[in-house]
Amino acid sequence: MTRAAGVLAVQLVAFWPVWRWYVSRLADGSDEPWGIVALATACAFVLARGRLRDPGDGPLRAATALTAAYAAGYPWLPPLVRALIAVAAVAHVAAPAFFGRRVHLALAGLLVLSLPVIASLQFYAGWPVRLVTTRICAALLDAMGYAVEPAGTCLVWRADMVAVDAPCSGIRMLWTGLYLTFTLACFARLTTRGTWIAYAATTAAVFAGNVLRTTALFFVETRLWPLPEGGHAAVGMASFALVTVAILAMHGALARRFRCVA
Amino acid sequence: MRTLIALLIAALASPALAVVHLTDKTLSPYFLVKGAGKAERLPLRSTSVKARVAGTIADVTVVQEYKNEGDAPIEAVYVFPGSTRAAVHAMTMTIGGRRRVAKIMEKAKAAATYQQAKQEGKSAALLEQERPNVFRMSVANVMPGDVVVVEMSYTEMLVPRDGVYELAYPTVVGPRYEGRPDGAGPGQAYTHEGVAPQSTFAFEAVIEAGLELAEVGCATHRTRIAKTALRATLALDEDRGGDRDVIVRYRLSGERIASGLLLSEDAGENFFLLTVQPPVHVEAGEIPAREYVFIVDVSGSMNGYPLEVAKTLIKDLFGELLPRDSFNLMLFSGGNSVLAPRPLPATAANLERALVMLARENGAGATELLPALEAALALPRDAGKSRSFVVITDGYVSCEARAFQLIRENLGQANLFALGIGSSVNRHLIEGLARAGAAEPFVVTAPEDAPATAAALRRYVTAPVMTDVRVACEGFEAYDLEPKWQPDLLSERPIVVCGKWRGARTGSITVSGLAAGRRYAQTYRVGEVTPGKDLTALRYLWARSAIARLTDDQRAAGDAQRAGEITKLGLAYGLLTEFTSFIAVDEVIRNAGGDGKTVAQPLPLPKGVGEAATQALVSSAPEPEVWALLVIAMIGIAAVVTRRDAPGRAA
């Protein structure tokens, strides 16, 4: 058995509390289960590489440090943070073992997305994102001639109120956009720098797309643009389709410039 | 190898720690709601209402009984509705056999007095107006075993519509979204759909209208009714009917215009009430020639169904016009345009011209109502005709106070009727315009409501009975009339004038106008009218009218001076207003420290209203589901993969 396989096997055993927690989170309905898709995608890329290589001492030291941090911090760290440390440790071994790279940011990204993060992102990041989205939408609508006032995370126009509430934060679009980006980055073998650029650009594109979606839905919800049933969802899908086109265009440009040789 | 050993040791430590923490829970964001312990949850035990109608004035007494059957002191809070016309003028609190008469105070002072009493451990009751038709009763330091009885009295003027008088007692505040987050108060608890009201409800009414009663009925509850020619008594035959308003309707007999004068003499101030009732049936020949100016909002916010409903309504109203009538059409948005410089005869050709002018509009621009009203009033009028303005708008204007004032000042020149159309009509403007015009507001929020509302508006506006109405006093010193100017008498709307008088009870009041082509006049010799012994209600009705007028203006302008005038009237006449509250305090300290849980009485859902109504009626813009987004992402991935693998492309 190669050293790489041995190390990975030990990690799978060592981090069993994380996998147990992961399975219970999938089953308890507290979060969306789509992390499985990201995990399956990561596994598919790993298996497609086939050959295992020795990871080298450097990545092993990093993995050891992360594992030590996991063990030392276990009594105090929230389960999600422990899981993040665990997947980072696994990624540090898998990247050199399967891809011959010290760091494979896209693979690590997919493993992070495989965790149940959507609910936690909604809880911690949802409100600030909605607040900023509301302000920008109000400014856009005002520029279009509608005297819309932002009131917290609501758009107030006359006696109508359109709430940019929790399901409107854009977190789902962000998760899916990042999934797309990391998958394309793995496929194109983007460098670490290229992957960082893709990640930042995707986040910006998704945010812009959510602002556009919310602005368009203001007209729908106030019945200025009466749409049939299903029109609301169609506007959301159309907005994400535009974001996807932007991501694909960006991917094409980055793939030409930031492709790994390995 | 050393690294590997270190990794193994580190890794092995983890499960050991995991064993120690076997109770590790999945942590996701959640909310914990704590139980209320053994405190009383439903303090309101019963509501008993007794109404006495004398003529067109209703005196109503409401008795609420609160009981604490828990084992801890509580503060009971109960939100309940009232009529928008109610003049609440008295309140008492009875606890432990001690009866305390409430005082009227400025709202902030009353609230501070209540808080102080509460903290000192004294029982206190505070009655506040939350909205014109919603009141809040707070009763502090209700000790275990206490029974607190709060009695509230109000007076209301009953105005008939289509010949029907309606005594309505609202029983429950329905779930309602406050509209603005900065205006939303604490959430109101409701019992579940299908659960009967938790407290008993009793209602009795005695009607002595002064004229022969044609019919009396209550369609909302099972009732026992006993009726003679001039008197009727009614009582509910069920005791859990507090989940829907009580509506008692009655008709009077009479085929001619009837008017009546009531006088009261009080220490310091005297009041009178003059009513002119239309006949029950109005023949076409009795309707004077009419002149209408249709003032239609064609601004951007009317785009779509509001303007389409307006067009249909105008066409419908045109169908009611006779060749002897005249009309004009004014369209307004940022500016205004008029069909003709003077009224046109209501011929088919002229009506068609108007419809063509209206059909061209799609809704664009700002909403400048005040200039449109001023321009309409400046238009020449046809002498001898009953002139009416019909304003159709969704109401988003910023000149409401001035618009109300303009309408009141010109009531003698033209009647004004307001129809609000749109999903988010500015009800304050529509209701304010209607009150200023001494009329009823009409609102259409959904397209399916348009035909019924349009029919009601048509009946209301198309049957004036007497025009050019004048109220003249000779030898009788009347002042502070509400309203100051009188509109036309309509078949659906009587004329009601409240006022004060001073000096000797001599002279006369004459009501005159043009009716059925002839001059009508009814003169009252004041000396022959005996002041009513039990007519203190007139002072409350007069004050209520003045407060309603000032409230419309104050809300529109946010005017501190008008707020001060309302407060002054509320304090002077002892009335509950937006700025004055009733407070009663029992000086016995019964709960040292004032500790106690505040319990908001859960309300029954109004009958026919589902549980979905308790959710905030706010539009929101949720994202698509993740699976749907993944489909688009997968399409994108497939596009990249197939493009890369396309024949002729390098790998």
Image (cartoon, grey):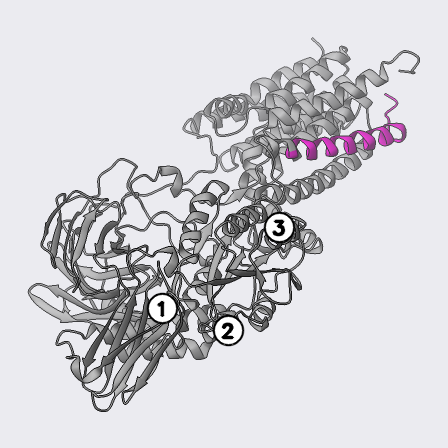
Q: Mark number for residue B406?
A: 2
Residue B401 x, y percent position in the rendering? 50, 71
Mark 2 vs mark 3: give the one in front: 3
Q: Give the residues in magenta.
A: A235-262
Would you say residue A245 sits in the magenta stretch? yes
- The Cα–Cα distance between marks 2 and 3, rounded to whole angstroms, is 31 Å
Residue B106 x, y percent position in the rendering? 32, 75
Q: Is residue B479 visible?
A: yes
Work out whether residue B416 or residue A257 is closer to the camera in this orientation and state it.
B416
- Tell me the element at label 3: helix
Location of residue B260 by image quarter: bottom left
Location of the N terminus of chain B (image quadrant)? top right
Residue A6 x, y percent position in the rendering? 66, 14
**Which amino acid does the dot numbered 1 rest on?**
Glu
Work out whether residue B118 or residue B519 is closer to the camera in this orientation and state it.
B519
Left/right of residue B48 with respect to residue B342 in the rendered view: left
- Chain for disc number 2: B
- Residue with the mark numbered 3: B352
- Which badge, 2 or 3, comes first in the chain's sequence? 3
The answer to whether mark 1 and mark 2 are in CB contact below 8 A is no
Q: Residue at x 8, y 63 (%)?
A: B96
- Residue with the mark numbered 1: B578
Residue B570 x, y percent position in the rendering? 31, 75
- Magenta stretch: dominant SS? helix
For the view shown, which residue lies furthest in the left direction?
A: B97
- Which badge, 1 or 2, comes first in the chain's sequence? 2
Above or below residue B539? Residue A52 is: above
